[in-house]
C-alpha cells in the first residue's frame, strides 16, 4: 500500500506515510469506532477523475453524523485535498481510503475530537477475478437495531472479515450474507443484484449499506431502459437465476458464476447485467455509453 515515498493526509497536513503514527489509546482502535470511505479515481481522457467524489464524501459526513462523531470538513475541502494527494503521489487509477478516527479517549461515550486521514494507492483491478463462486454465509449482517447499518463504520467490517474468511475456507470466493429475517442482504463489501427474464432485482434497504455503485446501476438501467426492482427475497429465489453480480466501488460490476454451487443460467455476455457492466466501465472513464441503447445490444 505504501513505500518510503508515499504521502498521506493526516489532520491538516500531508505527511510521509512511513513517518505517520497514531495514538494507541483511542476508541477507534479499541472499539472500531471510526468511519471510512472507499473511493476510486480513474485516468480518463480528461485527466484523473474521482468517480462520484461528492457522493462518497457526503456519505462520509453522514456516517460520522450517524455515529455521533464530531467532524467539520466540507465535502469540497475533502475533494480538493484528495486531488492534491493523488497528484503528490502521481496516481491515476487509484483506490482512495478516507478514515475518520477518534482519539484520545477510551470511554464509551461519543468521541470528543476526530481526525481525518486520507490514503491512496494504485489499484489495477484486483478485488475479485471473474467466475465468482458465492455461498450463503452462516454469519448474518449486523442487526439494524443494534448498529447504524447505513453508516460505513469500521467496526461493522469485523462481520465482513468473518464471512469472507468462512467462504474462502469452504472453497468459495465470496460470501452472501442474509439479514435477520433470512432475506438476502449483501456481500462482505459489495451490494448484490440478480437478473431474471431481463429484469434486475436487488435487496431493499434495511440491512445493507446503500451503495453508490448500486445507485449508479439504477442510473444506468434508467438510461438503457432496463427494468429493476428493490425488494426483499430469499436466497432460493436467486439460486439458478439468469445472472447475478456484485457491485461496489472496489468490485465495480463483477459477474457471479454460482450461488451455493448452483450456476446462473445465462452466458454472462448474453445478460442485461453484462450490458450494465460495460456501461459502468464507460461511465467511470467519462465515456459515452449511449450506443448500448441500440437494438443489437438492448
Ligand atoms: N456493502 C458493503 C458492506 C460495502 O462495504 C460496500 C463498499 N463500500 C458496498 C456495499 C458498496 O458500496 P459502494 O458502491 O458505495 O462502494
Image: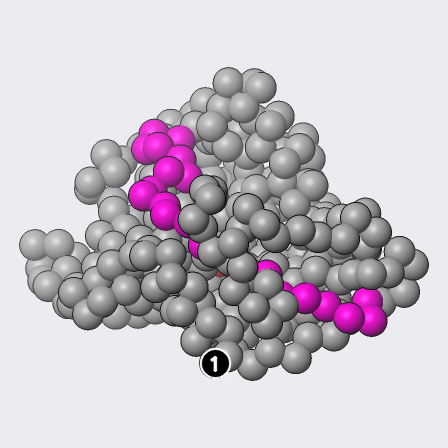
The answer to which quarter of the image holds residue 120 is: bottom left
Badge 1 density bin: few <14, some 14–19, many ≥20, Cα 10 Å: few
Residue 149 % position (x, y):
68, 58
For image coordinates 52% across by 54% down, the residue present is 16
For image coordinates 35% across by 32% down, the residue present is 129
Q: Check residue 116 for magenta coloring.
A: yes
Residues shaded magenta: 111-132
Residues 104 and 35: in front is: 104
Residue 79 % position (x, y):
45, 73
Is residue 14 among what the camera can see?
yes
The answer to which quarter of the image holds residue 87 is: bottom left
Say how many tags the image has: 1
The answer to which quarter of the image holds residue 139 is: top right
Residue 21 % position (x, y):
66, 51
Rendered position, 10 above or below 234: below
Quarter containing the C terminus: bottom left
Q: Is residue 263 left or right of residue 168?
A: left
User: Which residue in the protein does label 1 denote?
Assistant: 76
For image coordinates 59% across by 72% down, the residue present is 12
Rendered position, 266 above or below 183: above
Q: Check residue 25 for magenta coloring.
A: no
Residue 54 % position (x, y):
45, 75
Residues 4 and 41: in front is: 4
Q: Secondary structure at mark 1?
A: helix
Residues 277 and 161: in front is: 161
Amino acid at each position: 500500500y505504501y513505500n518510503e515515498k508515499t504521502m498521506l493526509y493526516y489532520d491538516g497536513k500531508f505527511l510521509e506515510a512511513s513517518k505517520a503514527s497514531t495514538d494507541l489509546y483511542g476508541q477507534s482502535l479499541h472499539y472500531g469506532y471510526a468511519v471510512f470511505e472507499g473511493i476510486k479515481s480513474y485516468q480518463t481522457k480528461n485527466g484523473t477523475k474521482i468517480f462520484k467524489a461528492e457522493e462518497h464524501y457526503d456519505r462520509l459526513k453522514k456516517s460520522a453524523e450517524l455515529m455521533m462523531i464530531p467532524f467539520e470538513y466540507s465535502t469540497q475541502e475533502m475533494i480538493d485535498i484528495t486531488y492534491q494527494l493523488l497528484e503528490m503521489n502521481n496516481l491515476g487509477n487509484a483506490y482512495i481510503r478516507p478514515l475518520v478516527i477518534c482519539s484520545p479517549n477510551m470511554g464509551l461515550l461519543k468521541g470528543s475530537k476526530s481526525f481525518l486521514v486520507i490514503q491512496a494507492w494504485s489499484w489495477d483491478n484486483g478485488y475479485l477475478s471473474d467466475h465468482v463462486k458465492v455461498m450463503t454465509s452462516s454469519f448474518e449482517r449486523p442487526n439494524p437495531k443494534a448498529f447504524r447499518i447505513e453508516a460505513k463504520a469500521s467496526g461493522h467490517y469485523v462481520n465482513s472479515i468473518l464471512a469472507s474468511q468462512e467462504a474462502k475456507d469452504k472453497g468459495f470466493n465470496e460470501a452472501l450474507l442474509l439479514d435477520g429475517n433470512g432475506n438476502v442482504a449483501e456481500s462482505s463489501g459489495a451490494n448484490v443484484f440478480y437478473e431474471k427474464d431481463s429484469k434486475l432485482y436487488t435487496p431493499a434497504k434495511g440491512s445493507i449499506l446503500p451503495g453508490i455503485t448500486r445507485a449508479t446501476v439504477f442510473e444506468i438501467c434508467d438510461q438503457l431502459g432496463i427494468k429493476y426492482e428493490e425488494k426483499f427475497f430469499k436466497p432460493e429465489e436467486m439460486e439458478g437465476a439468469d445472472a447475478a453480480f456484485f457491485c461496489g466501488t472496489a468490485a465495480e460490476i463483477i459477474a457471479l458464476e454460482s450461488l451455493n454451487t448452483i450456476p446462473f443460467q445465462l452466458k454472462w455476455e448474453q445478460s442485461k447485467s453484462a450490458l450494465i457492466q460495460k456501461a459502468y466501465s464507460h461511465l467511470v472513464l467519462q465515456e459515452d455509453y449511449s450506443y448500448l441503447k441500440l437494438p443489437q445490444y438492448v
